[in-house]
Amino acid sequence: TTTLPPPLFDLAHSRTVAARATFGTTPAVLAEIETLGLEDWIDRQLDPASIDDPAADAAVAGFTRLAQSPAQILAADARSEADAEVYWATVARSLVSQRQLLEVMVQFWREHFTVVTGGEYRVGHDRYLREHALGRFEDLLLASAHDPAMLYYLDNARSNANRSGGVNENYGRELLELHTLGIIDGAQVYTEADIRAAAEVMSGWSVESGVGFLYRDNYHFSGAVNLLGGGWSTPGRSGTAGYDDGRSLLVYLAHHPSTARYLAWKLCRFFVAENPPAALVDAAAATYLATGTDLAATLRTVLTSQELRQSSRQRTKRGYEWVLSALRTMGASVASGGEWNRYDSRNVPGLLRLVGHEPYGWSTPDGYPVENEWWM
């Protein structure tokens, strides 16, 4: 018998994967890939808890607001300080973290679950994205639906079925259009009636100012509702059962085949190509459904694919990625301070504004574009 030698280190393939799965390929990243092998490196990045990250920990060690509750931030009159800490922690982690794929995915979900609400609620938004970025999408979607920043931003906090204005449809619309079922090349599986129905089910999911999520039963629409031709329905309930209907709907949407396909399509657009290969989208969607909405498993299908291997030059770096990769190439460090909202070309916020890609800088719910032409 003949023992075959291990496969040679494929520098071009490794560079392509590293460019998509980090905020900038460095000699240290390529050396780690060569030592571990590409698939083992991907698996390690998909399990960020297994990676010691002292540089990132040190970079955010002084940011006390990141772990605080809305009430604590308000009590300290530190809303602007909290915004600044989220901003600088985002940049610093993107720059120095060893858990690069986690940071890339936090950015992906920050733009999928876009909010502009700041202050005491922004730290919580960043916290749950970081917690669930490589977990199950079901858990991530439930966390988003309980997020005060989201509920304020999309007007669900004041959606009241029992007042003259009635149910507000903003959150119901974006829940179906942007967060779950989606629209791909103009095709969608839901109707305006489904949007209305989703908004009715989610009415009552609100916020107690300065505290956090609060279910208000007196805001909730308690009539019969069905979505997607009866794929999900309720006879209409109130009290705790009304809240449970909302959770049930979110779980149903998370596991829907259209959600699987939409998320797979977005991940393939983000990591592979603006017009992703249909076979890869199908494979990623199948993994998502087979694993109970496991995002790490779904992403592994994308990152280890031949389609990604062959995708060099098919995706243009967007603004934030371009700035951060330049800084990582130079071995830069970030000195954070009170300058996060003063914009000129000599500081990081100024650079990010010039290239049009700041954390929490997109004002509409659809998130920053991925199209190459936009960034070129």
Image (cartoon, rainbow, N blue to C red):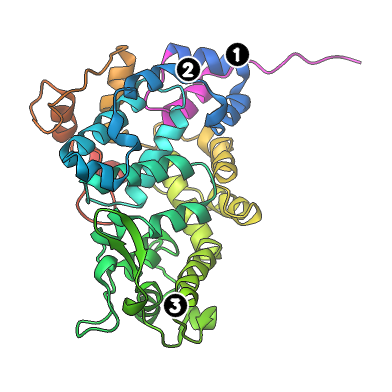
Inspect the image, locate mark 1, and give the three-letter code of the amino acid beneath it. Answer: Thr
Residue 243, numbered circle: none
Pointer 3 residue:
239
Q: Earlier in the sequence, mark 2 or mark 1?
A: 2
Check the image and report above or below for 122 versus 216: above
Q: Kindly report which numbered mark, 2 or 3, lies closer to the viewer in this rendering.
A: 3
Question: What distance separates the C-alpha of mark 1 from that of mark 3?
Answer: 57 Å
**Residue that lies at the very extreme toward the front in this rendered image:** 75
Q: In this view, does 181 lie to the left or right of 76?
A: right
In the image, residue 23 lies in the stretch drawn in magenta: yes
Pointer 1 residue:
35
Check the image and report above or below for 348 versus 223: above
Could you say where residue 321 lies in the image, as x and y percent from the top left? 31, 31
Could you say where residue 175 lies in the image, as x and y percent from the top left? 38, 64
Boundaries of the magenta span: 1-26
Q: In this view, does 218 lie to the left or right of 84?
A: right
Pointer 2 residue:
29
Toward which corner of the image does residue 341 lie, by quadrant? top left
Tell me the crowding category of disc 2: few under 14, some 14 to 19, or many 20 or more residues within 10 angstroms, Cα based.
some
Inspect the image, locate mark 2, and give the three-letter code of the amino acid beneath it. Answer: Val
In the image, residue 30 lies in the stretch drawn in magenta: no
